[in-house]
Image (cartoon, rainbow, N blue to C red):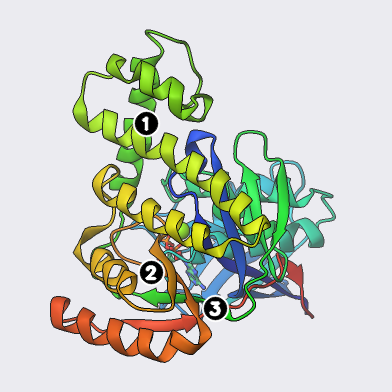
Amino acid sequence: MPVYFAPGRVNLIGEHTDYNGGFVFPCALDFGTRLTIVPNSERILRFRSTNMPQTVELPAMGPFSPLPDHCWVNYPLGCIAQLVEQVELPSGYDLMYEGNVPLGAGLSSSASIEVVTAYAFNDILNLGLDRTQLALVAQKAEHTFAGVHCGIMDQFVSAQGKPDNAIFLNCDTLQFDYVPLRLENVSIVLTNSHSPHKLDAGTYNQRVSECQEAVRQISRCKPIGRLADLTPSEFQSLQSAITDPVILRRARHVVTEIQRTREAVNALKSNDLTTFGQLMNQSHISLRDDYEVTGRELDTLAQTAWQIDGVIGSRMTGGGFGGCTVSLVKNEAIDTFRQTVSEVYQRETGLQAEFYIARTGDGARRIE
Ligand code: ADP
Ligand code: MG
């Protein structure tokens, strides 16, 4: 019985830029979702997960449509629904999922369960789709079955990740470069806020529409297709076309974040981690003040980290509100970092932070 794996990811910089056609800079993690597939003679698809209580059984001949109540099966089912448009499934399958990415923590367990499914069925059915096509299938599953109008970042890095490298991805053209993470005596530390506030689909989709509204208003002066079409100086001269102050702040975050992402990648390529870290901090401030997706928990984590010697940079990562921060921390400062951040966070919010040292990993693959 074949076993497949696809990773979660951490985005180092370039947040909420993907659905605006901008740049992102994520890396795949060494944790993710495993999928064991066993054919059955009952002609049913039986979905199970060690992370979820519900088992779902569906006739393998389809047709497939989204399940109610935010059922977890929508993520894999949305992928299978697309892949069987051309070919019929030769049998039923028992699908057993097992994830070790914390769910809903901004490390993209959703992309890992989608991509592992798309990768596995592409392999079993010999469909011949490449990794970028599989990422697009997974993204569409999230749009049409899970109802989140996400960009391509999460699925792309889960499909294309490479150990010790981050991916500098142009989300408009899908051209990408692997950039080696030469961090030497520095670690990528993830801090899980365990915040009860989640970025729900409604708030996420609202930010997507606010960016579309900014494009509409700017297009009255200069026709553009997406916010990534504007350089920061063009944005300066055109911003008065945006009449609503909230829409203006949303657009300013996106335009400046795309620029920060370019600069951060250049800094990393020239081994200038100090600049990289400062850009991470500025990214957090922009997400806090202009995009308004941080909240008290993530602000407390990042702002506490900024005060600690040996912290090179720290910012929220993922969609926002709950979830994790990502910090670059000198190895000799990690103990102090954990201790100080834990104490301050618990005092300020009553919550317990959890820490992981991130290790980068490979993209989707068959493991057995
Ligand atoms: P994130 O992608 O940041 O982890 P999301 O809210 O986008 O958060 O996705 C989390 C959802 O994905 C879960 O609530 C669940 O529905 C689904 N999911 C992810 N991994 C698994 C898994 N291993 N088993 C079952 N469902 C999963
Ligand atoms: Mg997700």
Number of residues whose C-alpha sits closer than 10 Å to that of mark 3, classed few (under 14), some (14–19) or many (20 or more): many
How much space separates mark 2 and mark 3, taking CA atoms? 15 Å
Amino acid type, residue under disc 2 in the picture: Cys
Query: Sequence order check: which comes first, mark 2 or mark 1?
Result: 1
Q: Write the residue at 64% across / 73% down.
A: 360
Residue 77, picture quadrant: bottom right
Q: Nearer the viewer, mark 2 or mark 3?
A: 3
Query: Sequence order check: which comes first, mark 2 or mark 3?
Result: 3
Q: Write the residue at 75% across / 68% down.
A: 365
Q: Is residue 39 left or right of residue 99?
A: right
Amino acid type, residue under disc 1 in the picture: Cys
Disc 2 is placed on an element classified as strand
Give how far across and how far down residue 61 sits, in percent.
65, 53
Give how far across and how far down residue 12 sits, in percent.
51, 60
Residue at the spot of label 2:
324
How much space separates mark 2 and mark 1, taking CA atoms? 24 Å
Amino acid type, residue under disc 3 in the picture: Ser
How much space separates mark 1 and mark 3, taking CA atoms? 34 Å
Residue at the spot of label 1:
211
For residue 109, above or below residue 130? below
Residue 296, picture quadrant: bottom left
Disc 1 is placed on an element classified as helix
Give how far across and how far down residue 175 sits, in percent.
71, 40
Q: Is residue 240 left or right of residue 155?
A: left
Residue at the spot of label 3:
187
For residue 159, above or below residue 206? below
Residue 32 visible in the picture: yes
Residue 117, picture quadrant: bottom right
Give how far across and how far down residue 25 sits, in percent.
57, 53
